[in-house]
Image: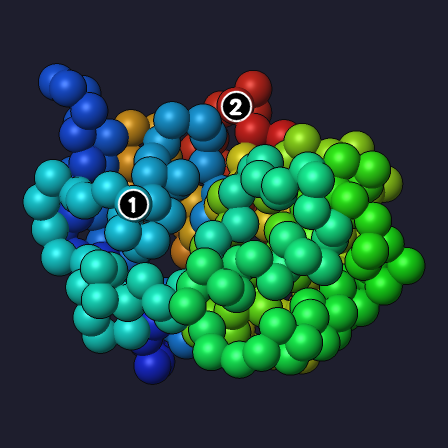
Amino acid sequence: MTSTQTAALAVRIEDMQIQFGSETIMSDFHLDVQEGEFLCVLGASGCGKSTTLRILGDLIPPKAGEVTVFGKPPHEAWSELAYVFQSPRLLPWLSARDNVVLGMTLRGMRGRRREFREVAEEKLSLLGLSHVSRKPAHQLSGGEKQRVAIARAVAVQPRMLLMDEPLSALDIKTRTKLRADLVTLWERTGTTIVFVTHDVEEAVALGTRVVVLSSRPAEVIHDVRVDAAQPRDLSSMDMVDLRRELTRGLDPAEITGV
């Protein structure tokens, strides 16, 4: 495991400042994300992880600094991104398939409804949901709903997925299954993924690179490339040592999976 090297960039953040009222969350913050990476951003609640995703997704502006996504400001790059939130945000009366179709429609993608449904079925199948594609969302389990949300995001063919603690509300069995699904999805699509978490085990299980943020005002305190093949044996000494390295300087009470 070695520090990351600069390559083709999906994201560049330079001198970014985030402030809420009189409180500074980030000051002169820098981060690069390579195209095709599965980047996990680890840190305690309130350090600015989710806020950074919102800035990349053009949901809020930074107070200061320069942010580019695929070489453009976020407001010009939004059509190349898709967002997965902690809550799946499905329409409960629509089927799993039609929730995915709705995402494609709202994105303004061109095509016939039949073609959209075929794409939706393909993405749901990729995430192991073919058997529930016609079920209304309110009849799905929590894990199934979140997989539908991921399928909806992938169906719009983004160059980058922004994932804001999408597994944190799920039980451990479901989280473990979804981790494997996400790795498969990333391996098959090559989509750049920026995945925010406060669970170090999750970061080690998923990421090709893990960036750890300090408490506010946040700065990068660890930046480590993870070269271990998938699926990873999280009980191996290499993985145990990596978790220790990544949590050095963090309050154990503020993160999980130590």
Is 88 left or right of 164, judged from the image as shown? right
Q: Residues within 10 Å of mark 2 (few under 14, many from 20)?
A: few
Quadrant in which residue 190 is drawn: bottom right
Residue assigned mark 1: 59
Is 21 left or right of 179, judged from the image as shown? left
Q: Quadrant of the N terminus?
A: bottom right
Q: Residue at x 20, y 70 (%)?
A: 72
Q: Please say whether residue 232 is visible from this viewpoint.
A: no
Is 58 left or right of 38, judged from the image as shown? left
Whether pointer 1 and pointer 2 mark residues with C-beta atoms closer than 8 Å, the reply is: no
Residue assigned mark 2: 254
Three-letter amino acid code at the position of disc 1: Leu
Distance between the alpha carbons at the discs numbered 1 and 2: 26 Å
Tell me if residue 212 comes above or below residue 182 in the rendering. Answer: above
Is 64 left or right of 243, judged from the image as shown? left
Three-letter amino acid code at the position of disc 2: Glu
Q: SS class of the residue under badge 1?
A: loop
Q: Residue at x 78, y 44 (%)?
A: 136
